[in-house]
Amino acid sequence: MFKKMLFLTLCSSIMTAQAIDFTYTHDCSGLVGGSGGSLCTDIKNEVESVASSDLPDVDISKYSDGTANATVIANTGKGSDYGQNFDLFTIKINPLGIGVDASEGGLSDPDNASGVAIGAGLMVGVNMDAFPIGKIGFFDFDKLDVMFNFMNLNVDQELDSAEASGEVSGLGLMARYRIMDPVDILPGYMVQWGGVMLHTGFQKSKMNMSLVQNLNDETISGSQGAFNYTGSFTNASGTFEIDSNTTVIPIEVSTYIRLAYAFTFYGGLGMDIASGESKIGFNGSGTVNVNAGAGGNYTGTIAASQVSKGEPESAKMRGFLGVQINAPVVSLYVHANKQLAADVIGVNLGLNIGW
């Protein structure tokens, strides 16, 4: 089920509109009127419309930059803890993170996103009070938490006329220091202010995927004058190759408030110092045959090949918010990030175990 969610997220955002251009080769010699006839013109227009209907409505060079930005924010927040102070250890399971760069179309037009990415992770953290280090000057190791996260997930999946293959992986090390300690306003976690925490470290993330849209199910049909025509594609497909690798050093300040034991609301500000590269490639090909009855036969081929490289924007400010539902030891959370100066957003959700 999780793999299908990842697959649907990518395919719905990448294989849905029309701005990578196919090149077309047409042979109308078998049609009434030949290459200059209105029947030929109608069929060519229909073939081009159908072939282009499953392509993204952004320039592929924009998509490479956007995918890099989306990879960064899809994996932001999974490597630290924002909604609790633990005494010994924490385990954070983040099964799904989604990042979208909607800078081109805006958040009101997500279908025209400049880039989309997915992430996931498993984080294990310990409080340094478990080690006999104590205090060095003003630095209190009891207030320091160190957290390691990792993930390597195969996301091969098939759905209808599309399929994906590849992997999503990540590796990170984060440290969290309590600048100000929590304050119990009402006992029993009825009202608790969580203090102020500083987070930093590094996060390496990778998304390497091949997304194939099969066009063989696409059909051509229409009429021109007295002639009705039908046709179909053969050996036709469009393939996206995505190879996105990013490294981020986040610097964050966060706080939280816990209410009625069960609910925690947290938020903060951060800056992401990002580097890396995203390479996007597209290849498409296929043949089409159309029969117009007494009007004759039409044959054609489609082809496309484009490659672009991009980089994430660095040193971008970001705000984040989260909500956590608490039970003894275990809590569920939703964490949202947004760049302050751009429509680059990310959401991840998961489960915390803390002691």
Image (tube, grey):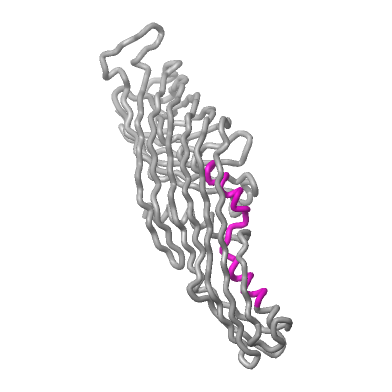
Residue 327 visible to the viewer: no
In the foreground, 176 or 298: 298
Q: Position of residue 208 (x, y in %)?
A: 43, 49
Q: Is residue 18 depicted above or below 83 in this figure?
A: below
Residue 56: where, in percent of width, then height? 58, 57
Point 47% across, 26% down: residue: 256
Asked whether, in this view, residue 313 is left or right of residue 194, the answer is right
Q: Nearer the viewer, residue 301 or 316?
A: 301
Q: Is residue 40 visible?
A: yes
Dominant SS in magenta: helix
Q: Residue drawn at (61%, 83%), measured in percent from left and top?
A: 298
Count of picture labels: 0
> What is the residue that sits farthest to the bottom in this orientation?
294
Is 57 a magenta residue? yes
Q: Residue at the location (41% across, 25% down)?
A: 190
Q: Is residue 131 left or right of residue 121?
A: left
Q: Is residue 276 above or below residue 60?
A: above
Residue 212, percent from left and from top? 47, 62
248 or 116, which is in the foreground? 248
Look at the picture and state if 105 lies above or below 24.
Answer: above
Residue 195 position, x and y percent, is 45, 19
| Span shown in magenta | 44-70
Q: Quadrant of residue 131?
A: top left
In the rendered image, the quadrant that contains the C terminus is top left
To which quarter of the image does residue 103 belong?
Answer: top right
Residue, x 35% and y 38% (percent of image)? 150
Quarter holding the N terminus? Answer: bottom left
Q: Is residue 164 above or below residue 316?
A: below
